[in-house]
Image: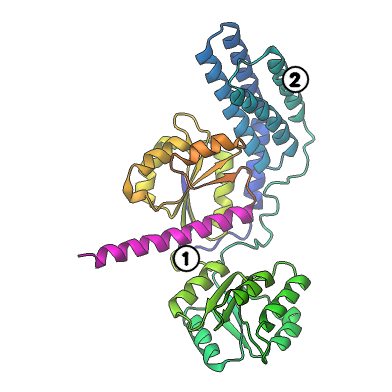
Amino acid sequence: MEDSGDANHQPPPSVAPQLARLRQNFLAELPQRVDAIQTALLDLRESLDQRDISQVLAGLEQLHQRLHKLIGAAGTFGVARVSAKARQMSDLVDETFRASSWPSQKRINQLRQLTEELRQCQQPPFEPDTGFSEIDAPLSQAPKSHCTAHVVDDDPIQVELIRSTLSKAGYQVEVFSAVTVYADLFVSLERPDIIFMDMRFDGDQYAGADRIQTLKQAHDNLPPVVFVSAMQDIHARLAALRAGATRYLTKPLDAPQLVRMADELSLRIPEKPYRVMLVDDDADVLAAYGLVLSRAGLTTLTVNQPLETLNQLEEFRPDVLILDLNMPEVNGAELAALIREDERHEPLPILFLSAESDPWRKMSIIGLGGDEFLPKPVAADYLITTVTARARRARRQRKLLQLARQSSP
């Protein structure tokens, strides 16, 4: 169990050595994982011979869980061929579940053949790491402590409102009064974290939208763009949306809303970093995802003993909870159901981290109290973006609930 990250803690300059060690641990344990899958298949065959339906179903579930563990772990550490072969086997098991029929000898033979192929895949040489190998590269979706905003508007009163509001909130603000000049200079400017753009310039009601559309065509990964306009009609909003608007605000502006939106879209680290709790019985995978989130500036607690989840939840009080789905003793769906029994945890986002691909299983599991599935393996940027967005909304919801309770008679 590990807690990493705090308000004064900067993410480590490099986590590559730690991730490399975790990958080596996984590769060393890989033969044991494959042996466990073969054992599960042998147990399933024995249950079939005994015509014990309860044991057959238990055997299928055990095989399903071990395969999904391998899919996620191999994908996380970039051993793609192992992950792909395990996925083939998992798909066959899922088909058997969906068919609700007795596994045929043909299906068992297919699984045996794939197990042998899986055993071949575990032999070196292994492909270069394609998992979190680039985690030390700048993460485009990682939260930032210092953010720059560009304000493009020819209304001095509006400009001063936005500039003063964002400056007081800690943003570095650069102002441009001419949209054509801004578009020409953009390539030479330091990339901002967010752009606030008026719609109307020099009598052209959609000039701002037109320039942003041009910039998006010329530059990949343009920062979030918030259009600010007195126009409230659907045509103006559609023009902004089609140009690539992230948000559309109408004048007069609300200062607190402006800052909240800037924080959300720029992924600025809050004064108190978001708190994330991860639960997974696979220690190496757990450590890898914990490193990714910690490096992004999130305070992270990793829990390797699933039965400790409820106790750790009370002590750590996370903004987001991430549960692995397939775990021994208690699975992620069961934990979510137990957590939702306590109304204090109703606002808590619960995300499942799983290699599960069956839509029916996902639907039934989400119904037990989860909010979203994250595919295992999950890209670092996607993980950070999703967790940060969920954490931000959860904090805001808790704050609103507290205000509502305080104001109620």
In reply to whether residue 399 is colored magenta, the answer given is yes
Residue 378 seen in render: yes
Q: What residue is pinned by disc 1?
A: 8
Q: CA distance from mark 1 to mark 2?
A: 53 Å
The mark nearer the N terminus, 1 or 2, is: 1
- For residue 254: magenta? no
Q: How is the image coloured?
A: rainbow
Count the marks.
Answer: 2
Mark 1 residue element: loop
Q: What amino acid is labelled 2 in the image? A: Gln
Crowdedness near tag 2: few (<14), some (14–19) or many (≥20) residues, C-alpha within 10 Å: few
Disc 1, disc 2: CB below 8 Å? no
In the drawing, does residue 117 fall left or right of residue 55? right
Q: Position of residue 273 (x, y in %)?
A: 47, 62
Amino acid at pointer 1 = Asn
Q: Residue at x 66, y 74 (%)?
A: 239
In the rendered view, tell whether residue 348 sits above or below residue 56.
below
Quarter in which the C terminus is drawn:
bottom left
Residue located farthest toward the left when viewing the structure as drawn: 409
Element under label 2? Answer: helix
Residue under the point 62% across and 28% down: 94
Q: Is residue 23 above or below residue 15?
A: above
Span of residues in magenta = 380-409
Residue 298 shows up from this direction:
no
Question: Viewer-proximal residue, 321 or 26?
Answer: 321
- Residue 76, given in percent of the width and then of the height, sits at 65, 43
Mark 1, Cα crowd under 10 Å, few <14 / some 14-19 / many 20+, is: few
Quarter of the view holding residue 255: bottom left
Disc 2: which residue: 113
Residue 116 rendering spot, x and y as whole percentages: 74, 21
- Of circles 1 and 2, which is in front? 2
Q: Is the residue 315 above or below the residue 231 in the image?
A: above
